Amino acid sequence: MATLSLFIVLLFLPLPYSYADPDPLQDFCVADLKSSPSVNGFPCKSALEVTSGDFFYDGLSKEGNTTNVFGVKVNAGNVLVFPGLNTLGISMNRVDLSPGGIAPPHLHPRSTESGIVVEGKLLVGFVTTGNVVYSKVLGAGEMFVIPRGLVHFQHNVGDGKALVFTAFNSQLPGSVIVPSTLFASTPPVPNDVLTKAFQVDEAVINGIKSKFGMQG
Ligand code: GLV
Ligand code: MN
């Protein structure tokens, strides 16, 4: 009976894997990105070496260069470039899109994403595990949320440039960009897998791979 009660209690306790990044155990733990021990996250810099500069980051202040095939530039403000975020479980991106530009379908394995459009007209959407798409065209000041791990996209449907800032409940959300994951990985995903998955001939797969500078 005691074991059964314990099991029921455990069943309703929030499980660690349902959290985003773990909570900090001290005021701060500025990442020592050069430290050799490998841990889950980064070891803390000595407090004696911590400066104000560790807690400020201006990498999202400048407009990104969107002259690329997707017409997008994502500038990530994560722990790798902003070590003060270490153990705090948050980070942000700046996303600039030229007219017609897209943030291609992608997902963040470690984080939910929210965002606020600052400029332009943006179609924002995500796809559920049941293949249902939820989407809306947003203007300046409007927010969205993308549940953790779901494939999502943004498309600048306005006449001018678009700017959106996104926020994550992870210091390093990770990005799986679907087209490059499937067609530009190293080593490549075998063509046999891709032809069957997409029900097309090998020439189509090779054509797509070549767009990413890959051989068949
Ligand atoms: C947009 O989807 C982003 O990941 O910043
Ligand atoms: Mn995203």
Image (tube, rainbow, N blue to C red):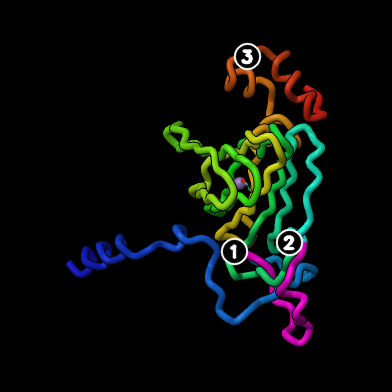
Distance (Cα) linking label 3 and label 1: 41 Å
Q: Main secondary structure of the magenta part?
A: loop
Q: Which mark is residue 90?
A: 1
Q: Looking at numbered disc 2 in the image, what kind of residue is underneath it?
A: Leu
Q: Is residue 48 visible?
A: yes
**In which quadrant of the rendered view does residue 190 lie?**
top right
Q: Which residue is mark 3?
A: 200
Q: Give the mark nearest the N terminus, 2 or 3.
A: 2
For label 1, being within 8 Å of ligand 1 is answered no
Image coordinates of residue 49 in percent, x first then y, are 79, 83
Q: Looking at numbered disc 3 in the image, what kind of residue is underneath it?
A: Val
Residue that lies at the very extreme toward the bottom in this rendered image: 48
Q: Which residues are magenta?
A: 40-58
Q: Which mark is residue 201?
A: none
Quadrant in the picture for the C terminus: top right
Nearest the viewer among 160 and 202 is 160
Q: Give the mark nearest the N terminus, 3 or 1.
A: 1
Nearest the viewer among 155 and 130 is 155
Nearer mark to the viewer, of 3 and 1: 1
